[in-house]
Image (cartoon, helix red, strand yellow):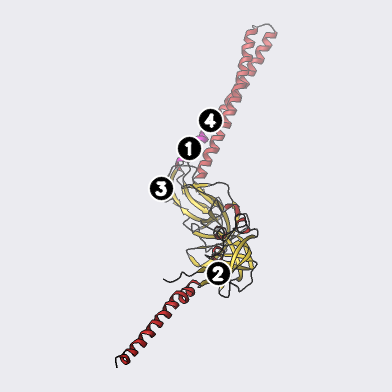
Amino acid sequence: MPSQRRRPFRLFAAIAVVALALLAAWWLFGRGGEAAGQYRTAPVERGDVRVVISATGTLRATTTVDVGSQVSGQVLEVLVDYNDQVSRGQAIARLDPAPLETRLEQAEADLASARASVNEARAGVTNAEADYNRKRDLVQRQLIARSEADLALAARDQARARVVSAEASVRQRQAAVGNARLDVDYTVIRSPVDGVVLLRDIEPGQTVAASFQTPVLFQIAEDLAQMQIDLSVDEADVGQIREGLPVSFTVDAYPDRQFDGEVRQVRLAATATSNVITYPVVVQVQNADLSLLPGMTASAEIVVDRREGVLRVPNAALRYTPPDAPPARAGGEGRQRGAPGAAAGGAGRPGAGRGGARRTLWVLEGKAPTAVAVEVGVSDGTLTEVTGVQEGQQVVIGQERPTE
């Protein structure tokens, strides 16, 4: 009876031991191996790769003219306002001309006095020549001393010199009159170009003081249909930019709209800000509908290179190397032309990886990855152009960590 009671207990214990052994074997070999073999993959796709350089800048009119005053005075009236269309030569403001008109009258009076002096000097010449002619005849008759004739000759020459001086004074007074008349004309401030008023920093009753520096009273944009962006491009990227490259940009006012432009100029005037060197790049923009306004901040992308319909893989695939892969030989192909470890820097930067550099991709065939040598082209920082693989192949971009 006791032995019969122990049999079920022994049978239950044996079943429990076998179950625990199977569970341990699955944990150590089945589950661990499955976790270690989980690869993250991405397909080789065909598409476009764009190499772009990002920069920000400010929109402004291609030609902007600052209009000031050449004379001082009190503003009588302002004839234009913000956003008004103006034409070349149009009066946009007037200063009080009274003080300058008084100066003009004084200059004209000085000119009249100078002309009278010329007439007086010419009359003196006529008298001096007549006196000299009389005394010359008397000297020939030996009725007077020659010294008196010499004095008459000197008086004649002096009278002629006074005429020349008086005529020069007339020209000087004429120049003063012309200058005073110009000052009176300058009391009417006129637009130098056809355009639109962007800034009006003047009010009636204000006193304008034009001294060594002309005050800016108006700012006129010549043509808002032609605008430009002044971009600041880092020195590491400016070497890839050249005139004529296409540019796409957005502004905060139209977040869902993309605008196009073209690089017009790469200027040589570098700017240093916190030890960072940037170069100004001017982008020409067509603004036919006048939706873009001066002063807007543009987020631009300069398209340096573009590949259409090429095979491409994620950059993570070029950086991946299996943990059990043999190390690359020193001086071998992997390190000479860029091993998978070196691909992280080469393919991660826009424009890098040109010239058919060699890299290694790991393609998942079955459950094990296989190394495939490829040539890489341009990269946009996320995707890289490759040749040497087929479209649709699964490349390994990472591996899941085994779960503890």
Q: CA distance from mark 3 to mark 4?
A: 37 Å
Q: CA distance from mark 1 to mark 2?
A: 89 Å
Real-space Cα separation, disc 3 to disc 1, in angstroms = 22 Å
Dot 2 alpha-carbon crowd within 10 angstroms: few under 14, some 14 to 19, many 20 or more = many
* 311 in magenta: no
Q: Which residue is mark 3?
A: 206
Q: Which residues are magenta?
A: 99-110
Q: Quick one: label 1 or label 4, which is nearer the N terminus?
A: 1
Q: Compared with residue 271, is residue 320 higher up or lower down, i.e. above or below?
A: below
In the rendered image, the vertical position of residue 364 relative to residue 331, given as above or below? below
The image quarter containing residue 4 is bottom left
Q: Which residue is labeled 2 in the image?
A: 396
Q: Is label 4 or label 2 in front?
A: 2
- Per the image, label 4 sits on a secondary structure element best described as helix
Q: Which label belongs to residue 180?
A: none
- Left or right placement of residue 151 versus residue 272 in this view: right
CA distance separating discs 3 and 2: 74 Å
Q: Secondary structure at mark 2?
A: strand
Image coordinates for residue 349, horizontal then vertical, percent: 55, 58
* C-alpha span from label 4 to label 2: 101 Å
User: Secondary structure under badge 3?
Assistant: loop
Residue drawn where x is 66% and y is 14% of the image: 134
For label 4, the residue is: 113
Q: Can see residue 190?
A: no
On the image, numbered disc 1 is attached to which residue?
Answer: 103
Q: Earlier in the sequence, mark 3 or mark 1?
A: 1
